[in-house]
Image (cartoon, grey):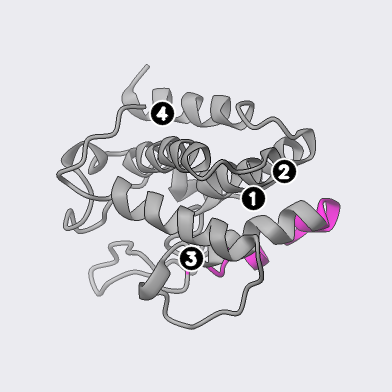
């Protein structure tokens, strides 16, 4: 087994660290809808932002696991209620799943190399529409949290209510810290 496969297995195991069965089911439904590139993408397409060990095939999964780990710590630090913690952790697992857009419409440069789409925090609204229809309360909350994960770098400004606004800020902090080259996060 290679690192990419190890990270993918750890990703699936992380789902069951979430204590809410509806959220677990929502995540399992979403996994079927995740673009295939998510499982093989580098943590950074340019190498500019992420630690070197994420700039390999499967590095985006490693990045996601680190965000998940940091969200666990932030949830503990903020003494989040179980429901809020579960929403935050689920959002961490899905936050970059549509990072380059939809299959067949990925953002590519002139050479055909895939890149990060600045609107990717919004794509789960469409990409996970079927899963949200089955779990509307959990799904909508998770998508609102994901939509905020780029913080001040988000291309458009969104209006989101509590507790999703606070959870979105925590996800943004975790994502930002996980992408720093000089911060080591064990998973």
Q: Is residue 116 left or right of 163 when viewed as pictured?
A: left
Which quarter of the figure is the N terminus placed in? top left
Identify the residue position indicated by label 1 in the image: 33
Relative to residue 45, is residue 160 depicted above or below? Answer: below
Q: Residue at x 20, y 41 (%)?
A: 183
Pick the front one: 92 or 167: 167
Label 4 to label 3: alpha-carbon separation = 22 Å
- Image location (x, y in percent) of residue 139: 73, 55
Q: Residues within 10 Å of mark 4 (few under 14, many from 20)?
A: many
Query: Of helix, strand and loop, which mostly describes the magenta segment?
Result: helix
> Does dot 1 land on a helix, a strand or a loop?
loop
Q: Earlier in the sequence, mark 3 or mark 2?
A: 2
Q: Residue furthest bottom?
A: 156
Identify the residue position indicated by label 3 in the image: 101
Identify the residue position indicated by label 4 in the image: 7
Q: Residues within 10 Å of mark 1 (few under 14, many from 20)?
A: some
Label 2 to label 1: alpha-carbon separation = 7 Å
Q: Residues within 10 Å of mark 2 (few under 14, many from 20)?
A: some
- Image location (x, y in percent) of residue 187: 37, 27
Pick the front one: 109 or 140: 140
Q: Which mark is residue 75?
A: none
Inspect the magenta stretch and tell me whether residue 83 lies in it: no
Per the rendered image, the range of residues in magenta is 120-136
Q: Residue at x 30, y 39 (%)?
A: 57
Q: Earlier in the sequence, mark 1 or mark 4?
A: 4
Label 3 to label 2: alpha-carbon separation = 19 Å
Identify the residue position indicated by label 2 in the image: 29
Label 4 to label 2: alpha-carbon separation = 19 Å
Label 1 to label 4: alpha-carbon separation = 19 Å
> Does dot 4 land on a helix, a strand or a loop?
helix
């Amino acid at each position: 087994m290679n690192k990419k496969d190890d990270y993918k297995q750890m990703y699936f195991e992380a789902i069951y660290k979430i204590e809410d069965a509806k959220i677990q089911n929502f995540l399992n439904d979403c996994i079927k809808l995740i673009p295939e590139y998510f499982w093989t993408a580098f943590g950074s397409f340019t190498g500019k932002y992420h630690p070197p060990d994420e700039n390999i095939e499967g590095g985006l999964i490693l990045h996601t696991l680190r965000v998940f780990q940091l969200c666990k710590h932030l949830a503990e630090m903020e003494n989040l209620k179980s429901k809020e913690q579960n929403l935050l952790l689920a959002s961490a697992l899905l936050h970059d799943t549509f990072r380059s857009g939809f299959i067949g419409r990925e953002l590519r440069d002139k050479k055909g190399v895939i890149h990060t789409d600045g609107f990717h925090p919004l794509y789960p609204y469409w990409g996970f529409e079927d899963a949200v229809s089955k779990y509307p309360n959990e799904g909508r909350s998770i998508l609102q949290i994901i939509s905020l994960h780029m913080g001040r770098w988000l291309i458009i400004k969104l209006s989101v209510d509590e507790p999703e606004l606070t959870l979105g800020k925590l996800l943004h902090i975790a994502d930002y810290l996980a992408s720093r080259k000089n911060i080591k996060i064990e998973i």
